[in-house]
Image: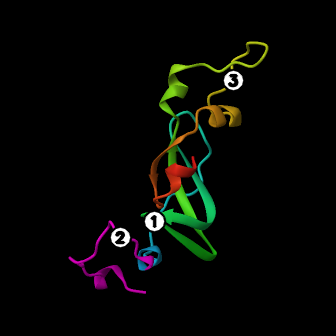
Amino acid sequence: MESIAETVFDPDWRDDVFDAQALEIPLALPGLMPRDNSIWVEVQALHKETIFDQQHTYDPYRFETAILKPAELSKQFTLADQDRRAIASNSGIASVIFPPKAWMSDSDGHSKRR
């Protein structure tokens, strides 16, 4: 593996075309962080994903890290159960009704699965 001192800027590298070598670049990603009402981090194993309209399969998998934030609609409405008790905005059911949005991710396809 190259050290940071050996890393050279490549002016021909394109960020609009998938390059599997990019997945081998070591990144300092945040660890799993529980959901709260601002942002949180989720990590999941991916066996396949679509990047730039191309399907990619990983053997056995790669970890995807995403920093998520609540959907804007979840801030404008309060959910209630059948007894009119408020449902916490960070609950699992709230995530189904108002899916969180990827604020940042190391995958092109993350926001499409949310």
State the residue in front, 54 or 35: 54
Q: Is residue 24 left or right of residue 32?
A: left
Residue 31, position as x, y percentages in the image: 56, 57
Residue 104 - label: none
Q: Residue at x 53, y 71 (%)?
A: 56
Q: Residue at x 79, y 13 (%)?
A: 83
Query: Mark 3 or mark 2, which has the lower sequence index?
Result: 2
Between disc 1 and disc 3, the foreground one is: 3
SS category of the residue bearing label 2: loop
Residue 63, position as x, y percentages in the image: 58, 66
Identify the magenta region.
1-20
Residue type, numbered disc 1: Ala
* CB contact under 8 Å: marks 3 and 2: no
Q: Is residue 76 above or below residue 19?
A: above
Residue lying at the far right in this picture: please name it: 83
Residue 75, position as x, y percentages in the image: 51, 24
Between disc 1 and disc 2, the foreground one is: 2
Residue 55, position as x, y percentages in the image: 53, 68
Residue 87 - label: 3
Quarter that holds the N terminus? bottom left
Residue lying at the far left in this picture: please name it: 11
Residue under circle 1? 28
Task: Indicate the quadrant where residue 82 lies.
Answer: top right
Residue type, numbered disc 2: Val
Query: Mark 1 or mark 3, which has the lower sequence index?
Result: 1
Q: CA distance from mark 1 to mark 3?
A: 35 Å
Q: Is residue 111 left or right of residue 48?
A: left
Residue under circle 2? 17
* Principal secondary structure, stretch drawn in magenta: loop
Q: CA distance from mark 1 to mark 2?
A: 22 Å
